[in-house]
Amino acid sequence: MANSKYEYVKTFEQPDNLLSRTWIVIRIDGRGFTKLCSRYGFEKPNDRRAIDLMNSAAQCVMKDIPDLLLAYGVSDEFSFLFHKDCTLFQRRSNKLVSTIVSTFTGYYVHLWTNFFPDKPLIPPLPSFDGRAVLYPDVTSLRDYFSWRQADCHINNLYNTSFWSLIQKAGLDARAAEKRLSGTVSKDKHEILYAECDGMNYNREPDVFKKGSVLYRSFELESRHALLGSSETSAPETPTPQSKTVAEKDRKRRLKATVAIEHIDIIQEDFWNQRPWILSGKTGRLPDDNAKEKS
Amino acid sequence: MANSKYEYVKTFEQPDNLLSRTWIVIRIDGRGFTKLCSRYGFEKPNDRRAIDLMNSAAQCVMKDIPDLLLAYGVSDEFSFLFHKDCTLFQRRSNKLVSTIVSTFTGYYVHLWTNFFPDKPLIPPLPSFDGRAVLYPDVTSLRDYFSWRQADCHINNLYNTSFWSLIQKAGLDARAAEKRLSGTVSKDKHEILYAECDGMNYNREPDVFKKGSVLYRSFELESRHALLGSSETSAPETPTPQSKTVAEKDRKRRLKATVAIEHIDIIQEDFWNQRPWILSGKTGRLPDDNAKEKS
Amino acid sequence: MANSKYEYVKTFEQPDNLLSRTWIVIRIDGRGFTKLCSRYGFEKPNDRRAIDLMNSAAQCVMKDIPDLLLAYGVSDEFSFLFHKDCTLFQRRSNKLVSTIVSTFTGYYVHLWTNFFPDKPLIPPLPSFDGRAVLYPDVTSLRDYFSWRQADCHINNLYNTSFWSLIQKAGLDARAAEKRLSGTVSKDKHEILYAECDGMNYNREPDVFKKGSVLYRSFELESRHALLGSSETSAPETPTPQSKTVAEKDRKRRLKATVAIEHIDIIQEDFWNQRPWILSGKTGRLPDDNAKEKS
Amino acid sequence: MANSKYEYVKTFEQPDNLLSRTWIVIRIDGRGFTKLCSRYGFEKPNDRRAIDLMNSAAQCVMKDIPDLLLAYGVSDEFSFLFHKDCTLFQRRSNKLVSTIVSTFTGYYVHLWTNFFPDKPLIPPLPSFDGRAVLYPDVTSLRDYFSWRQADCHINNLYNTSFWSLIQKAGLDARAAEKRLSGTVSKDKHEILYAECDGMNYNREPDVFKKGSVLYRSFELESRHALLGSSETSAPETPTPQSKTVAEKDRKRRLKATVAIEHIDIIQEDFWNQRPWILSGKTGRLPDDNAKEKS
């Protein structure tokens, strides 16, 4: 049973390597999560356990794949960032997307009982789909993350208003929808205060208002802090790292803690204070510091 | 925080719809399974529990996604087939690949304890990557599946010989490799018989020799049986189904049992006896039959 | 000035090979031909010289590129067909499209004075754009050509009616447009007869009504004629030709006359009587025949 | 003959829009120009008339397509640059490539007799193929053009040495090739001086040593000169031009002279002194200036 006569079928596989020197965002989305929410009785408008599960799964993905620089999550979606110079899997689109989606799903299912101990998973299991999007410069890349965070805010303000009208003001879904129709942001703040037991939207938890930002935690070194982001200061000439440096770098990434924060990523501050994210270089680990001082 | 100023970033998403009227194969592969095998002590050359877990996960994928026609698995890989006229997710490549990979991974992790109750999963969890390959005609499509099954046979004969030389003939890995170097199929059969306690390769289990074939089980109706595969008999004109027919069809698929067999898919017989696989039409369910007779 | 430091820029070139075993249609379209028509005073609704120029250019393209099987032209567009097994330029899309477009344009400009001796070309020169479209089976491929020929008919009937109302019935453009608004095919036939000096659309020249079909002229051999097109009769197994056969084949193609006809390609007849077009095999040349007989 | 039943074939056309905000280079290459050179007796190592014809054709392409920023040509190839924000043809790859190739070929054939009045073109006519390559940042983009110019230098030094050894030192091709084998740049300079009648490579015409650079000629305004290239100074935020501004801009481009120069484009100077090329903005036209002063 010689295999050679069939091997020509391999020629039907088409290359899908993503353009070099371009930022890669992999966004994954829950499939049919509306149904999932109701099946497992997720709280409305936000279920903290469900969000913590999403964040834990994303944290594990970042731990397993050290090339990842950043992840931003909200609701049932998560966006993962690879550096423009990343060469993982020769930048093959399907390979990158499927690996992220697979790793995320595995942890989501595996960690489920930690967050919903009383609600065992039953088929069909939760699943996610994914896509790769390329951004050629830091401006469009940051605008992508701003878009997701602005979207988080807009949706959360709406959902908080909608469910508060139901849960606190006693409206039904149709009435709540009608009440909010045509309202702008300011109106919703007022509705919450005036009609929903004096709710103050600004006091809602940041995890709901801003979503979740995951990145590797390095110490801010003063030189970096002054220089700001790599895009404006570093020379663009591609200087491939030596293998030793690359390997040392990889180990540092694997060792770094993956922080989960609920903060603004639209403004400059987030990026300026963590210059290693966009530079793709590793910063100093807290205990490197310790060693050096001692 | 108006979102409109950021929305232009959506234009960076590029369409990846797969060519119409072309067979879609999604192949998934385990990532780093050599390490996984040794971590969880999989038996060599084949671990029946590991294969049964793969097959169960694939069966669940076929249950969850009724558009799938066929799946073929061997070792840590599985190939899933969509019909050339399938329009699921508008045939978007990343969406199809990621959905299959995610669903498969979810079940693999979820079902793990059923097959390895004494070996709890610890991070990094098993994960899979995937790719989509298009085949424009039935000849190349069947050659694809023949390629995978021939590959299964070749690898299994080698691995069985290699591990038997170690386990039964007492060779070490290097010696076993050297013993097999340059041998053809017939030689390996003889080595097994002469040097490994009279092993007869032909009596090895089909699940190892032929891999696993999954498909929906319908009753063979005589008309179909006579007509053979759709490619040669059915008119090629695209006749879109009415919505009612499509929905009825979908329900039949969801209801059908997904069979797992370990049989030859290189020869005509497999395909001729199950004409519904390539026709993409549903056959008669055993109990439809029953109802009708009564 | 070592070049090696810049060579990395080659890695930005992305492969664009078209899916194997799939029919390739390259369609080219005149750019801004409405302006061109008025600048050079093309006759309305059809300018025979302009069409003959298009056809001559296409004939030269077919002469220069022996892999081409067929070309169909109407107005300022032409569609060229490569066989599904064609491997020219490793099936690279941009290379195939640009070569056809370039060759066509060169001849169009070069031959212009033969057809418009009194109207020298002045910049901006006529130009064409092109695209590649894949068809995985003969049904969709033939439907593509049927689509273009049906389109030719519909447009020509409208244009003939519109310009006859102006030229023979004395209407202005607006009135002619209004007269035709909402009419079906039959109405237009009647308008031509009743309002435009008894014109009979069916007696209009076939070159306007059916467009132009170009193919290599081989003698119909009885065996072929009986067998019909390769799709239904020949085994699909890919049997690569020997180099000698391929070269002989290529020479025959180069030697064959490229016929220009204005006939129906929607019905079976055209294809059945010229089985070599879709089989991709060469037929017998008239003088092969002669040689053999002598 | 309703066309609607065939229209589904349009769905086989697949989108090929190039990634947004990325520099587009279209490179075209002569097909089979070695044969062409010998058929029309081009001079060796460089035929000035052939190069002037290439440059004239490229100049006409830039005149016809105002979106083009720059063109660089050497031998039988030309690279054309579109701005990263260019939206011509919705950035469809095949459309951009085929339009450039078609326009270039048309002029090449049309202008031929101006440069080779005594050598009428005979079929097969000269033709070109083309491809699109994307560069996400100015560094890689400039490295692309440096790569082409360094390549020009290396090839021209070799060819000049090779043909001088034949034409002046009386070697045959094989001997000349052997003489140059293993030599570096400096050696070739010495061979030219010592063995080929005291030739000084540095005194060879720049058009051969550096190739040809085409760009629209605007006056250097001091503000621009100080600011340098857009990449480092201009805000990256996408601020779409108003329609009026865009139209005025377009007119200025159409009006600007297209300069042809044979100068270094590897160093900063070229780009710093012509900031409008990469900024994609139009500069001041010489007569705008005149008007203003008057």
Image (cartoon, coloured by chain):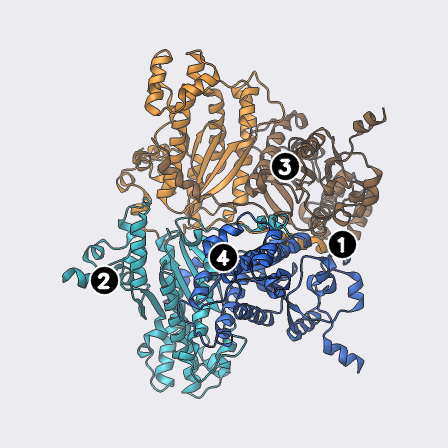
Chain colours: A orange, B brown, C blue, D cyan
Amino acid tagged 4? Asn
Q: Residue at x 49, y 83 (%)?
A: D173
Between marks 2 and 3, how big is the CA–CA gap? 70 Å
Q: Quadrant of residue A276?
A: top left
B287 or C156, which is in the foreground? C156
Q: Residue at x 57, y 20 (%)?
A: A39
Between marks 3 and 1, how big is the CA–CA gap? 27 Å
Between marks 4 and 1, how big is the CA–CA gap? 49 Å
Which chain is home to disc 3? Answer: B
- What's the mark number on residue A88? none
Mark 3 or mark 1: name the one nearer the start of the chain. 3
The residue that mark 2 highlights is D219
Q: Are marks 2 and 1 on the same chain?
A: no
Q: Quadrant of residue A194?
A: top left
Q: Considering the numbered disc 4 on the image, is that residue within a helix, a strand or a loop?
A: helix
Amino acid tagged 1? Val
Between marks 4 and 2, how big is the CA–CA gap? 34 Å
Residue D73 versus residue C193 in the image, above or below: below
The answer to whether marks 4 and 1 mark residues whose Cβ atoms lie closer than 8 Å is: no
Left/right placement of residue C239 relative to residue D159 reads right
Amino acid tagged 3? Cys
Looking at the image, can residue C5 be seen?
no
Q: Considering the numbered disc 1 on the image, is that residue within a helix, a strand or a loop?
A: loop
The residue that mark 1 highlights is B184
The residue that mark 4 highlights is D94
Image quarter in which the N terminus of chain B is found: top left
Amino acid tagged 2? Glu
Closest to the camera, between mark 4 and mark 1, is: 4
Q: Residue at x 43, y 58 (%)?
A: C9
State the image coordinates of residue B217 (x, y, percent, origin top left): 76, 34
The residue that mark 3 highlights is B37
Between marks 2 and 1, how big is the CA–CA gap? 76 Å
